[in-house]
Amino acid sequence: MPELPEVETIRRQLAPVIEGRAIAAACVRDPKWVQPVRSSAFERGLTGRTIVHAGRRGKYFSFKLDDGAFLIMHLRMTGNLLYLSESAAVPEKYLRGTLTLDGGAALAFVDPRRFGTALVLADADQADGYFAARLGPEPFDTSFSGDLLHAVTRGRKTSIKAVLLDQRTVAGVGNIYADEALYRAGISPRRRASRLTKAQCERLGDGVRAALRAGIDAKGASIDDFRDAYGVRGSFQDQFLVHRREGLPCPSCGLPVTKTVVAGRGTYFCRDCQRD
Ligand SMILES: [Zn+2]
């Protein structure tokens, strides 16, 4: 399931090739992709518009258009957003929609499990409201700090991992990067959030940023479906410290990594380096 580094990998690849390009044609192949909006209305809203900025917020693509509207897309479980040069064939399998750009290149949204979404919001106020209702701060913004983590964890009786997975705590962290961030911070994923000290919250903020940065540098993690804009796998799965490494040695102490379930998700940690 794509998290911030996977979405950011695609965004960075797309920005130089789609910014300033007009959408010559929008085509919805799977009406569920844009529900509850009708396919024809979605297509009409995009055709003729120019993409002026390829942005991201949390795990969402947020593409600003020349009429001030925003095209928002989320990959959910298995979505991929592919860039196809003018000579490339459009993949028919699992295709949910395409945006053909002036000059003939295209973006194709491919998604076997069909949970991914796309919508158009009319202006920046609507986009800001949409994200404010769903997302906390961006992890690389100064507003995301140890102090903030300390404040939001007070009174939270749930595990710190559940708090990290909540997109309203910090935008873009999912199961992979939560495990990696908690390991880097030396904090058990099972620890009750309200019991974290200020120093631990500082370390966790640093851990979140370090784990996400490593993921971006490796062009994302491809455990199953993730591919970048050119259909290439990321390599971060080869650099996991604990995630998906059950029984393998902890990089720090050498004891075998433990797998358990926290917040309903398969969770990997070192019992010695991350004490409850
Ligand atoms: Zn260890």
Image (tube, rainbow, N blue to C red):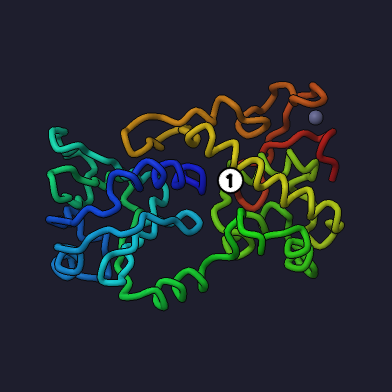
Q: Amino acid at mark 1?
A: Asn
Residue 69 placement: quadrant: bottom left
Residue at image position (30%, 59%) is 52
Whole-percent x, y for residue 134 in the image: 51, 68
Residue at image position (61%, 50%) is 264
Q: Is residue 26 above or below residue 126?
A: above
Q: Secondary structure at mark 1?
A: helix
Residue behind mark 1? 175
Whole-percent x, y for residue 44 in the image: 14, 68
Whole-percent x, y for residue 178 in the image: 64, 46
Is residue 62 left or right of 154 when viewed as pictured? Answer: left
Residue at image position (13%, 67%) is 40
Q: Nearer the viewer, residue 140 or 117?
A: 140
Residue 88 placement: quadrant: top left
Quadrant containing ligand 1 reads: top right
Q: Is residue 130 above or below residue 254?
A: below
Residue at image position (84%, 45%) is 276
Is residue 164 left or right of 48 when viewed as pictured? Answer: right
Q: Nearer the viewer, residue 193 or 204?
A: 204
Q: Is residue 255 above or below residue 83?
A: above
Any atom of ligand 1 within 8 Å of the CB at mark 1?
no
How many tags in the picture? 1
- Within 10 Å of disc 1 (Cα), the crowding (few <14, some 14-19, many 20+) is many
Whole-percent x, y for residue 27 in the image: 15, 55
